[in-house]
Amino acid sequence: KTELSKIVQKVRKGLKEDLKKLVDFASRNSHVDASYKLVCHEIMNETKSKNPKVRLHMMYAVLHLTRETTKKRNYRMRLAQRFEKLLVPNFARVVNGHASDSSQALHEDQLEKLSRVLAKWREIRVF
């Protein structure tokens, strides 16, 4: 597994220090033109999880990446644009999981947390 894959696997568990490692990785690699695409791809793969907690943790990851990564070379903006392109059409899946299994939907407390993430995105004008 790549360093990025290992970090994202840890982010699945929702620990703040792992979010910081993800942001550090993204900022450290911002000089590589395609790195923002790799970061987005890894996160978006995890939004397909059947586990609602994992999907929520990935939304925290998107928030942290779009708020905390370096602004050099428009890296943060490119991340936000890529996430918007990939996340917006798939947002219902993030909230509801796979349509055939209602047990995969975010629970009420998780929806409240997601609502706070959305409010932060509006506040910092990410999407």
Image (cartoon, rainbow, N blue to C red):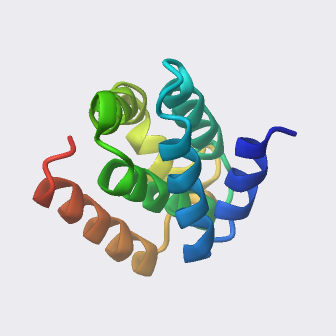
Toward the viewer: 105 or 120? 120
Q: Is 6 displayed left or right of 36 in the figure?
A: right
Q: Position of residue 42 (x, y in %)?
A: 63, 37
Q: Position of residue 50 (x, y in %)?
A: 68, 53
Is residue 31 visible from the viewing direction of this image? yes
Is residue 52 visible from the viewing direction of this image? no
Q: Is residue 64 above or below residue 41?
A: below
Q: Residue at x 45, y 56 (%)?
A: 59
Q: Is residue 72 above or below residue 66?
A: above
Q: Is 27 displayed left or right of 126 in the figure?
A: right
Q: Residue at x 32, y 39 (%)?
A: 76
Toward the viewer: 110 or 104? 110
Toward the viewer: 99 or 76? 76
Q: Is 33 displayed left or right of 67 in the figure?
A: right
Name, please, the residue furthest toward the right.
1
Name, please, the residue furthest toward the top.
33
Tag count: 0
Q: Is 120 displayed left or right of 110 in the figure?
A: left
Q: Position of residue 74 (x, y in %)?
A: 28, 30
Q: Residue at x 20, y 40 (%)?
A: 127
Q: Residue at x 41, y 43 (%)?
A: 92
Q: Position of residue 15 (x, y in %)?
A: 61, 75
Name, please, the residue furthest toward the bottom.
109
Picture quarter with the N terminus:
top right
Toward the viewer: 48 or 79? 79
